[in-house]
Image: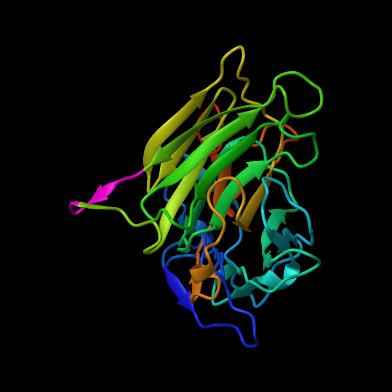
Amino acid sequence: MTLLPHPAGSHRALPGPILLAAAALFAVPTANSRAQDLDLPGWELSWNDEFDGSSLDLTKWVPLDRRDSFNQEEQYYHPDQVSVADGHLQLTAINTPRDGKNYQSGLVTSRDLFGPGRFEARIDLPTSQGMWPAFWLNANHVPWPQGGEIDIMENRGSQPNLVSSAYHWQKDPGPCCDEHRLVYREYAAVENGQLLDFHGGFHTYAAEWDDTTVKFFVNGNLYHTVTQTEERPIFDTPKNIILNLAVGGFFWRKPGRHHRVAADDACGLRPRLAAGGGAGGPRSCRPRVGRQLAEEPRLR
């Protein structure tokens, strides 16, 4: 985990899920992670963001400004909580109220839409009860969840040894959510005889999405495959890439009083995507994106 100094002023960052700190979120390239180094056989990098500037690239991303979110979350998403420095994208959650919400945090969504491919990011998750970081894909331009939602990684700030993935869908057109369905799976691993600590450093989270399956990976290990059935379509609807740090919500407990002014927690992320790119279709991303070189293109 990357620890950040307390921000100046009276507010404090909250420890929490994903690139948060007060909840912070980061997208961080490793020493060999430049665009030409997508060393996955059969894949070609087609889109990426190394976050090597001094501010968010607004040609690629939109920082959200929204008071009311879903899932009983308690944050106000504000652009001030999104920053880029030292090759990192950082989303920071603070316990400074705004417009009736107890907390502020950050969320970014890609301007581009991406079709099937491989999406990947290296993330250092923050720790603390009430933090809910996520790296996911959603078809923002159609009613949820008719285009399908792919949750590549979610984490609870109070569970450092467990991450999860999910696929949401609704087969029949109509208002949400009587027909909403989802499947999910949790992942834990053992390293050197100890449960792996996902809050203790960067780990790689990825999803491979094609016409009939969605496969989920952690550190290169395939642990969950969702396969299309008659009642569970795998939609090819183009999707936005989303990185966010929520506070509270029904995914887990509210932030505890003793967590409200804890030291900042930071989460690092290097997203990358590989895509097949059919005729007129979107390309893949990393924010790395790649294109498969096999006869039948797919995203990695």
Q: Please, which colouring scheme is shown?
A: rainbow
Comparing 187 with 282, the one in front is: 187
Instruction: Look at the picture and state if 94 lies above or below 47.
Output: below
State whether the magenta stretch is mostly helix, strand or loop.
loop
Q: Where is residue 26 drawn, in percent x and y?
A: 54, 65
Q: Residues in magenta?
A: 188-193
Instruction: Look at the picture and state if 8 lies above or below 81.
Output: below
Q: Residue furthest bottom?
A: 8
Q: Where is residue 200 drawn, in percent x and y?
A: 36, 64
- The residue lying at 80 percent from left, 35 percent from top is 142
Comparing 264 with 255, the one in front is: 255
Q: Residue furthest front?
A: 257
Query: Is 297 covered by the magenta stretch?
Result: no
Q: Where is residue 267 drawn, in percent x and y?
A: 50, 64
**Res 98 seen here:** yes
Number of labelled discs?
Answer: 0
Instruction: Look at the picture and state if 141 lies above or below 79.
Output: above
Left or right of residue 167: residue 75: right
Q: Residue furthest left?
A: 193
Comparing 129 with 118, the one in front is: 129
- The residue lying at 61 percent from left, 68 percent from top is 93
Left or right of residue 94: residue 69: right
Instruction: Look at the picture and state if 162 lies above or below 255.
Output: above
Q: Where is residue 14 drawn, in percent x and y?
A: 56, 70
- The residue lying at 53 percent from left, 43 percent from top is 152
**Quadrant in the picture for the N terminus:** bottom left
**Res 284 seen here:** no
Comparing 213 with 293, the one in front is: 213
Q: Quadrant of residue 25?
A: bottom right
